[in-house]
Image: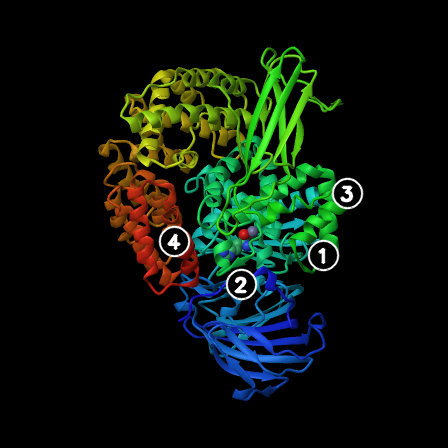
Amino acid sequence: MSDPQPTYLHDYQPPAYRVTHTELKFDLAPSATKVSARLQLERNPARGEEALPLELDGEGLRLERIAIDGQALNPDEYAQGDSGLTIHRVPERFALETEVVIDPAANTALEGLYRSGSMFCTQCEAEGFRRITFYPDRPDVMATFTTTLIGDAEREPVLLAGGNPVERGELPGGRHFVTWEDPHPKPSYLFALVAGDLEKVEDRFTTASGREVALQIWVEEENLGKTDHAMASLKRAMRWDEETYGREYDLDLFMIVAVNDFNMGAMENKGLNIFNSAAVLTHPQTATDAAFQRVEGIVAHEYFHNWSGNRVTCRDWFQLSLKEGFTVFRDQCFSADTNSAPVKRIEDVSFFRTAQFAEDAGPTAHPVRPDHYIEIGNFYTLTIYEKGAEVVRMLRNLLGWEAFRRGSDLYFARFDGQAVTIEDFVGCMAEVSGQDLSQFMRWYSQAGTPEIDANGHYDYAKGEYHLTLRQRTPATPGQPDKQPLHIPVRLGLVGTKSGHDLSLTLDGEALGTDTVLHLREEEQHFVFTEVAEAPVPSLLRGFSAPVKLRFPYGREDLAFLLANDSDGFNRWDAGQRLAMLALDDLIAAHRNGVEKVMDPRVIEAFRVLLGEESDDKAVLAEMLTLPSEAYIAEQQPVVDVDAIHAARSFVKQGLAMALRDEFLAIYEANLSEAPYAPEPEQIARRGLKNVALSYLMSIEDERAIELAQRQFEAGHNMTDVRSALTLLTHSSRGDLAEPALKAFGEQWAHDPLVMDQWFTIQVTRPQEDVLDRVRFLMQHPAFSLKNPNKVRALIGAFAGQNRVNFHRIDGEGYKLLAEVVIELNRLNPEIAARIITPLTRWARFDETRQALMKAQLERIRGEALSPNVYEVVEKALA
Ligand code: ARG
Ligand code: ZN
């Protein structure tokens, strides 16, 4: 077999034929489902006068019949290959009929039509539809769909597809059917069906213009009590999109289905969103606050796609961020409006700077709009989604909300029902604002994280503050040279005497106390005049651009910003920077075998925080959280996992010892007997309380152990139980861990989503014997390599979150991951290509580990690889 070949953006051509209507009939059976398709096709004038052959995608389909306008084709009239079928000559306008047989039960890749437990479901984005029937499976071919599902009346009493149900009836042999019609032309990737023994929870929504919409969440019977939060989130999201973007829902019915086996979070299929059960089901006893918030965000995300994705979709998959970046930005704003806006920003940025920066610095770095790919399934990345959202956020900030909203209105009006490009989107923003966004477009084509070196000084005699900003984007694979970007740098100058933001005057213009500098050149110099006192600059407020910004802050400066900055995000960031300086010293001390000494300034800064009667407990909880090991690693030239772990534990314990009483007081002040609700005030209290407990447990204080045990046993809600169980499990005291784990595992053996948490808690323990536990748990009856949630909860969590053990110097962690990748490569290539990520980051480690990691990548390369794993491994070893 020849190596998989890339697809290039510059090769894009419009389709030779358009599909105006698609009629599908599914005769469902687990191992042999018959799919009959009737496509209305017509020649696309955009490709000229000449009659071109008709190319259809199709994989793993057994063709039983093919006919044009009722006339069966002779074998010499078409050619069939591994990836599709070509019909040499076709009329200008015609009906193509095919019948194929597929095997959903054997589909462990979970793309196309597959079985999840006893149900049938689909995942078609990006290229799953071609595993269902022969079709021009590309997003710029949009058709109306009529779908008939035939199933067993007992085993599949519920038969769902997108659109509105128009007909149903009984059939001989205990079978029945339902026909669905979707009046909105859609690309094949938005097709979906679900069949099985499901129950629904129903609600209603009245749109702004008075249209009644039925809302349904379909689940397996045992999950009926876990849909309230998703339903409430859906209604909030529908209202928010009307109020914020003027977007109304457009069908009479909106359905969500929860399935247990799903590669990603969820999918925005028109009228029939399919969700990973982990992204929809919640209950106070089984889901943490974080899970509740994740569900709210994902429900909103998929709903928002109905406009940013479905009504206006992508011309080709290179434009993926057109819908994903915009939709993530929309769901981030929704969550910020619904919860605590500064905390949402802190969480998002903290994740972004850890995970997306790492992607940008690794061998799979790619621009927000890539220009080639081998397997598009590998490009559902943090860069496309999260960096794409940051780019849209910068547009919002550059234009201001009001103009941005006009740009969004123009985009939806002009391109409704079309498949378009990122230029179309940015073009609308340029048009409504009159701004020149041509340099800004580089954000879409240039990979890598820009670095800004900032320097400043105060001229006391002249009352001036001089700021120099210098930008540079490091080389990434395939992009050695970078151009300067248009970077919005929001900032303020905080007066060291007053502790307040000073008025800003630049080139004689008064700019208020907070402004955005436009950095466009490699280096720019800014002189603020009439600066009455020496300031500390607060730079990149709110993370106004997805860059790394360095400034030679002293520790006093950072403690000052932590206490005084008016920007909540930058206060938090100052605390992180301060902690990083202390951590750097300790990492160096650990490496040099020198005794570690705790920086008293960090203790003082924390003492101030803990003493504040802060009304924003959620922000306080974030400020008390030390940078994660993964984030610290990102800051090091060569990652030393052991030194990082030792240094971070040392700081944590140092703070806990110095501020024991303060932490204890915080813990006690935030206990609450109120019945659980996933609302911001309660979430903040629980968060703060559990952060305090984690400090106390880090020194295994007797009182803390007692509190953790009591919290675990009280079982008020999963947030508190999971926190306590994690702390007990991660303590050095096996006598605490084992009984709690056993009790929890027995109590929740029936609930797969809780067992996922049980796996994660165990495999993230820092103790050295954890690798044996990972292998042991892989044999546990609740574990299965075929279920992506299980793989993520156990293998993903171990390799991604347990850094000291995954990076064991004997290489056993790497070996284990390679074994799993090799097996998953056969079962589920998409998951295999994701779970391998930690191995691809070998270049960041010492030589011994580099060699061990590369050896495992080579071992994987020796296998017969799916295009997904092939692409990632080739890049990693390039
Ligand atoms: N469009 C979906 C979402 O972001 C994700 C689909 C992912 N599909 C895939 N094959 N990776 O909401
Ligand atoms: Zn999405």
User: Mark 4 and mark 3: span between their CA atoms?
Assistant: 45 Å
Q: Earlier in the sequence, mark 3 or mark 2?
A: 2
The residue pinned by badge 4 equals 877
Q: Nearer the viewer, mark 1 or mark 2?
A: 2
Q: Which residue is mark 3?
A: 434
Instruction: Residue type at mark 4: give it.
Output: Leu
Mark 2, residues whose alpha carbon is within 10 Å: few (<14), some, or many (≥20)?
A: some
Work out whether mark 4 precedes mark 1 in sequence or the reverse, and give the earlier one: 1
CA–CA distance between discs 3 and 2? 35 Å
**On the image, numbered disc 2 is attached to which residue?**
7
User: Could you tell me residue 103's position as x and y percent?
Assistant: 43, 72
Q: Earlier in the sequence, mark 4 or mark 3?
A: 3
Question: What numbered label is drawn on residue 415?
Answer: 1
Local crowd size for mark 1, using a 10 Å CA cut-off: few (<14), some (14–19), many (≥20): some
Q: Earlier in the sequence, mark 1 or mark 2?
A: 2
C-alpha gap between disc 1 and disc 2: 26 Å
* Residue 871 rendering spot, x and y as whole percentages: 44, 58
Quadrant showing the N terminus:
bottom left
